Image: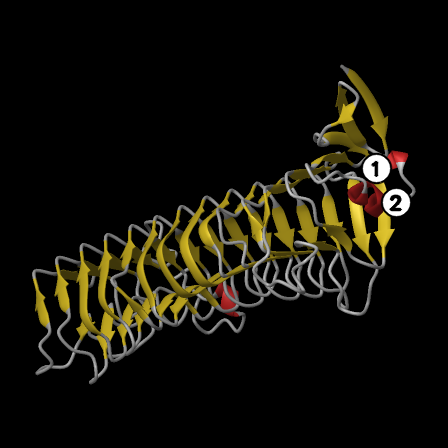
Amino acid sequence: MKKFFHLGFVFILMNGAAQEPVPVVLDSSDFDSIQKAFDALPESGGIVKMPPGTFEISEPLRIFRAETRIEGSGASTHIKNTNEEGKPAFVIEPSTIAEDPNARLWRIQLGNFRISGNEKSGHGIQATGIQEIFIQGLSVDHHGGHGIALIDCYEDPRVNDSIITYNKAAGLFIDGCHDIVVNANHFEENDDAVFCTDAFNLCMNGNNLDDHLGNGVVIENTYGSVVSGNMIEECQGTAIILDRDCYGITLSANVIAHDMEGGVDLRDAHGCSVSANTFTLVHRHGVRVGSESGRITITGNSFSNSYIGNGEIKRPIEDQNPIKIDMGTGVVLEGASLVTISGNTFSGISGSAVVADDAASKCLVRGNIITDFGRHEEGAIPLDLPDGKGHQVDGNLIDNP
């Protein structure tokens, strides 16, 4: 058996006949550009290793080989997109996708480097039609579009252990994907942190979302998902939104703090659970259930202000800086029906713990603790649900020292 190398390809000759190329390991510093290293990969894929350094690009880097990993040297490998015409830094897609929108590539991985852009550049990463894409250990920042856009990456996309910051659109945009894992990332000062639409089975756990100009997590037309164990703080919008025919989603064990437009907004959601979350210093509402939503369970949550034992309001409502207002909010039912609200603790609430409008009906409010309510609303009552709408309200412990 003989081997010889040519342009990054490895051929194996047996009895004088060239066989199919096998995957290779390439160093991008051996080529005139990073793109040429990508181009040199055989059909069977391989690894391209990028050395430390800042590499300015004005056109997208394109990856079009399956079974490929792009590996940097940590944040010291910096891909800097100088394009000001809205073009992405990376485009990952089958070479034939323009002619065949159903074309797919399998198993492309990116790890351990930084991608930055500018206000006029496009997305950091635009991946279309990639099955089992795996993104890990990236720094993705300052792009004019999304930090990472996964479009029709249907099978098992994974985004882990990355920091995604200061992007003008969403930090992570997910469209048309399935069995999605988003774990242990840090999102900061994007517009929305994560926007997931027309998808299935999002598993989003253990992420830190901080200081977003829009919302924390927006999920639309998606089912069978879980958002748990995340820290979602200081969004100018809402921490979590479910909209457009969401169902079968669990929101659990998240800390939702200092979000200006609300904690959880169930705009169009059915058969969903909101459990074991902590809502503290959340403005407008802890949980809102809209008229297009129903069959919702809200249980075992804590809704609170900044009380730590001395009973004082630490930051008065008159303070003009919203982030400094001592605020606790509860549950708002706007036209919703068949909602269970049980086993929650409402403490240090600005108004009522639970408020329902005249269009809401058939809701069960049972076994909750409500204390220290009506801090900022004169005449507030603990549970404000109109009579004659089929609500059942009983077994609640109400204390207002």
Residue 304 image point, x, y percent: 33, 58
Q: Is residue 349 above or below residue 80?
A: below
Q: Quadrant of residue 171?
A: bottom right
> In this view of the protein, which residue sits in the foreground, 224 or 216?
224
For the residue marked with disc 1, what is the amino acid? Ser
Image coordinates for residue 360, horizontal then vertical, percent = 20, 79
Q: Residues within 10 Å of mark 2 (few under 14, many from 20)?
A: few
Q: Position of residue 169 (x, y in %)?
A: 62, 66
Residue occupying the far top of the picture: 1
Q: Which mark is residue 28?
A: 1
Q: Mark 1: give few (<14), some (14-19) or many (20+) Cα within 10 Å.
A: many
Numbered badge on residue 33: 2
In which quadrant of the rendered image does the C terminus lie? Answer: bottom left
Q: Mark 1 and 2 residues: CB-CB less than 8 Å, in contact?
A: yes
Of residues 397 and 184, the one drawn nearer to the viewer in this rendering: 184
Q: Secondary structure at mark 2?
A: loop
Count of marks placed on residues: 2
- The residue furthest right is 32
Q: Is residue 6 left or right of residue 24?
A: right
Label 1 and label 2: CA atoms lie apart by: 7 Å
Label 1: element kind: helix
Task: Left or right? Give the position of 92 relative to 309.
Answer: right
In the rendered view, tell whether residue 328 sits above or below residue 252. below
Measuring from the top left, give residue 317's x and y in whole percent: 43, 71
